[in-house]
Structures are given as structure tokens and as C-alpha cells.
Amino acid sequence: METAVATTGESLPSLPDNTSGKHKDIPIADIIEFKAKGLTHQQIADLVGCSKTNVTERLQTVTQEIDSVKNFKKHRADTFAVIGHRLINSLTPEVIKEMSGLQMMTAAGIAYDKERLERDLSTENVSHDVLIGTASDKRKAYEEAVRMRLEGEG
């Protein structure tokens, strides 16, 4: 099976030849990946066994969504902060009657954790004495292993 070479010089596996020129069920993720690797629409079409028009149409249907996802990723922490803010502010007496407070607080807590994760802040509390004890135990075990090795080789 031959391989196609992207404009980046990277080899891409070719897919089975389709003599009819049409190929159904081509995963859009494959087309997007080939496009991201610098292939032209015609090169992608040749690779996956469909028409250039098909590739162009498939990419047009997802381009806006891809851009939206990129924007979401760029602003994910703020998005989680907004969601958490909305959840906390929506906790009214009327809503509490329809939903349990636990459900609302759980959602708010998850949004808070996700926001902290995206901002590279802690998402859990760790006791320093546990860390020191663990480090101390590891150091003692290492020193013991070194001592035993030295005595065994002496």
C-alpha cells in the first residue's frame, strides 16, 4: 500500500483504493487531520477515495464548529467560571423547590474545580506533613538500599 506525503514531508497512510470515486462513511476526523497536516482538498480526496467536492463540502460543514471549539479551548477557564456563576446565581427559592440544593451545589463545585484546573491552580488540598513523611520515608529507604549495596560489595 502506498503512502501519501503531506506538504510537511510527513508520510500518511493511504486508504484502500475506491475505483468508483465515491467513498461513504469517511470519518470527518480523518479529513480534518489530513487538512491540518497541510494536504490540499484534492490530495485528501485521492487519499480517502472520494471527490474533491465531497472533501470541500464536508470541511465546510465543520469549519465553523472547529473555530468555535478552538475559541472554547482558549477561554475554557472563563467559560467554566461563567457557568459556575450562573449556577450559583440561579439558586433561588423557586429553583430549590424544583431541584435539590445538592444538585445545584454539585454542578457549581464541578464548574469551580474545572475553572481551577484550567487556571493551573490546585484542585485538592494536600497536607504538607504527609508529603514530608513520604519524602522522608523514601529517603530512608534509598539510604538503606545504598548501605546494603555497599556492604554487599565490600
Image (spheres, helix red, strand yellow):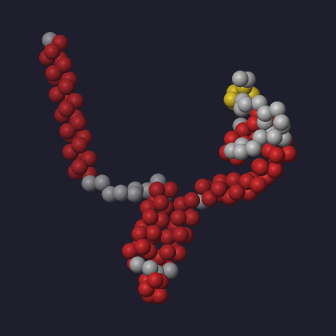
Q: How many marks?
A: 0
The front one of 134 and 11 is 11
Q: Is residue 95 above or below residue 43?
A: below
**Where, by quadrant of the figure, is residue 11 drawn?**
top right
- What residue lies at 21% left-to-right and 45% top-to-bottom? 133
Question: Quadrant where the N terminus lies?
Answer: top right
- Horizontal and vertical percent position of residue 8: 73, 31
Furthest-top residue in this view: 154
**Where, by quadrant of the figure, is residue 132 drawn?**
top left
- Horizontal and vertical percent position of residue 137: 20, 39
Q: Is residue 13 above or below residue 69?
A: above
Question: Quadrant where the C terminus lies?
Answer: top left
- Please indicate, yes or no, whether residue 8 appears anywhere in the rendered image: no
- What residue lies at 20% left-to-right and 23% top-to-bottom? 146
The front one of 115 and 3 is 3
- Please indicate, yes or no, whether residue 72 appears anywhere in the rendered image: yes
Q: Is residue 97 above or below residue 21?
A: below
- Horizontal and vertical percent position of residue 47: 76, 33
- Please state if 13 lies on the left or on the right of 46 as rendered: left
The front one of 5 and 138 is 5
- Horizontal and vertical percent position of residue 80: 53, 64
- What residue lies at 65% left-to-right and 56% top-to-bottom? 69
- Please state if 28 lies on the left or on the right of 46 as rendered: left
The front one of 87 and 17 is 17
Furthest-front residue in this view: 20
- What residue lies at 41% left-to-right and 69% top-to-bottom? 106
